């Protein structure tokens, strides 16, 4: 079984009275985590109850709040117990339903999970304000992937392994860039079966979330947009161009993009700017949550570094490293581009500090600063900057800015120091 980093904070939140809400894309492992928590609690002698709304036998108890409470009391009595509810997005007005139960001050702790569509349909953020804590489970991170592939031998010295075993790590990077991090894909060893599994994951997303739950009346156009995005990662989105290509309006393109983002397929990254007259301030760039899904949508599943745009795929990979490492901090991630085509791939910002990050999918031999990064440094005077690449490590000074050349595996340590 793949050990997920989210398990520890979930365990810690079990003692809190608020509802524990686990969201994330389909097939990311939410049910597996909940079953594991249930098993641990049962082993500790605590009473638990598990509902799965994909099953009619369980769904019948959700016809009313009273019926569900009666069922829970029948099984657990009035003592403290943990109630797990899987696929909560299948319940209409799920957050209002849970709010009414929570406000009864019952002796039960609720742990619920649902896909991204839960937040869209149930508006769980607003209805459960002050009554829940959200935990987002994405597909397997590269750190989790490497630990699993090395059978957890280096779990407490992962950075040392990455630094010493470069050839082995590069093979793992290639596999991760080829197939991504969906748990079933990671654990499957047969390449042909990986493709079948990804096809099933994608069809499940379209049929269950996009058609059934969100009611998109033109799923073919929606799928075409996902495919177009998969070959535009890390690049400037042009809404009008997308609309013309798909034969839909710009507002519809923006609506679909919002839905794709909220169902955990992509992230939108907005520009960094201080001079709106010279810098592009509106159109975002996009990155996929999972590289395997991105490759599949592009018709390049398993191609990875052999994709014609593999540099952008690696840029997506580095974005994921940064996002996962900084997700609980006060850092924000942007990009920078000017009208005269100077651009920096990622800009990390927080109050009083800005860090530009350039990404190079190559074994750099010399510590050379490209024009765009040099322009940004001269304009904004950051204390430090990163050039992430495959192998070169070192630093140079540009004016008062220290520019660090970092192999991608050294980025973890650098981000931990921020």
Image: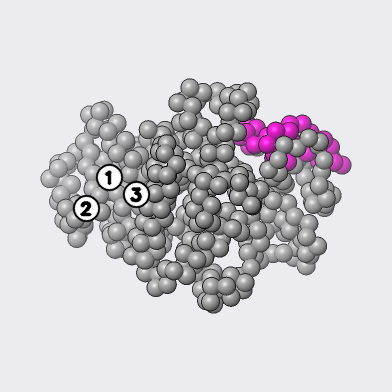
Whole-Å distance between the Cαs marked 1 and 3? 8 Å
For numbered disc 1, what is the local secondary structure? strand
Q: Earlier in the sequence, mark 1 or mark 3?
A: 1
Q: Where is residue 390 drawn, in percent x and y? A: 68, 36
Would you say the residues marked 2 and 1 are in contact, meaning their CB atoms lie under 8 Å apart? no
Whole-Å distance between the Cαs marked 3 and 2? 15 Å
For numbered disc 3, what is the local secondary structure? strand
Q: Earlier in the sequence, mark 3 or mark 2?
A: 2
**Outermost residue, right side:** 399
What residue sits 39% from the left and 61% below the top? 206
Number of other residues with Cα within 10 Å of mark 3, as a class: few under 14, some 14 to 19, many 20 or more: many
Image height check: is 362 above or below 209?
above
**Residue 248 numbered tag:** none
The quarter in which the C terminus is drawn is top right
Observer-side mark, 3 or 2, equals: 2
What residue sits 58% from the left and 41% below the top? 321
Residue 93 relative to residue 182: left or right: left
Reply yes or no: does residue 31 show up in magenta.
no
User: Which segment is the magenta one?
Assistant: 386-415
Nearest the eye: 370 or 77: 370
Q: Quickly name the residue at label 1.
A: 84
Reply yes or no: does residue 403 show up in magenta.
yes
Would you say the residues marked 3 and 2 are in contact, meaning their CB atoms lie under 8 Å apart? no
Residue 297 relative to residue 369: left or right: left
Q: Quickly name the residue at label 2.
A: 55
Q: Quickly name the residue at label 3.
A: 113
Whole-Å distance between the Cαs marked 2 and 1? 14 Å
């Amino acid at each position: 079984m793949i050990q997920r980093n989210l398990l520890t904070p979930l365990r810690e939140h079990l003692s809190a009275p608020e509802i524990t809400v686990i969201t994330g894309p389909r097939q990311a492992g939410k049910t597996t985590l909940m079953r594991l928590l249930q098993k641990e609690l049962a082993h500790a002698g605590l009473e638990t109850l598990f509902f799965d709304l994909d099953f009619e036998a369980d769904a019948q108890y959700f016809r009313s709040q009273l019926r569900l409470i009666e069922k829970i009391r029948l099984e657990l009595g009035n003592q403290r117990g943990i109630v797990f509810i899987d696929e909560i997005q299948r319940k209409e007005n799920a957050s209002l339903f849970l709010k009414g139960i929570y406000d009864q001050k019952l002796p039960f702790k609720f742990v619920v999970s649902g896909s991204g569509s839960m937040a869209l349909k149930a508006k769980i953020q607003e209805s459960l304000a002050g009554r829940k804590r959200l935990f987002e489970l994405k597909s397997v991170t590269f750190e989790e992937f490497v630990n699993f592939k090395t059978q957890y031998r280096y779990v407490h010295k992962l950075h040392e392994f990455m630094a010493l075993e470069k050839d082995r790590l590069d093979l793992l990077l290639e596999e991760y860039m080829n197939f991504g991090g969906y748990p079933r894909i990671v654990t499957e060893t047969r390449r042909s079966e990986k493709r079948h599994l990804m096809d099933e994951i994608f069809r499940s997303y379209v049929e269950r979330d996009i058609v059934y739950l969100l009611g998109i009346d033109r799923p073919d156009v929606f799928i075409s947009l996902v495919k177009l995005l998969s070959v535009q990662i890390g690049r400037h989105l042009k809404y009008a161009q997308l609309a013309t290509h798909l034969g839909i309006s710009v507002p519809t393109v923006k609506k679909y993009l919002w839905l794709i983002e909220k169902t955990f397929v992509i992230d939108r990254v907005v520009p960094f700017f201080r001079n709106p007259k010279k810098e592009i301030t509106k159109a975002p760039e996009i990155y996929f949550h999972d590289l395997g899904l991105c490759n599949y949508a592009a018709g390049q599943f398993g191609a990875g570094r052999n994709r014609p745009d593999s540099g952008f795929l690696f840029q997506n990979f580095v974005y994921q490293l940064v996002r996962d490492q900084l997700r609980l901090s006060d850092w924000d991630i942007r990009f920078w581009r000017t009208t005269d085509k100077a651009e920096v791939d990622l800009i990390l910002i927080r109050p009083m500090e800005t860090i530009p990050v350039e990404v190079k999918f190559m074994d750099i031999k010399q510590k050379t600063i490209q024009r765009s990064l040099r322009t940004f440094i001269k304009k904004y005077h950051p204390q430090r900057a990163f050039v992430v690449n495959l192998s070169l490590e070192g630093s140079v000074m540009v004016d008062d800015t220290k520019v660090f050349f970092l192999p991608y595996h050294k980025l973890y340590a650098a981000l931990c120091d921020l």
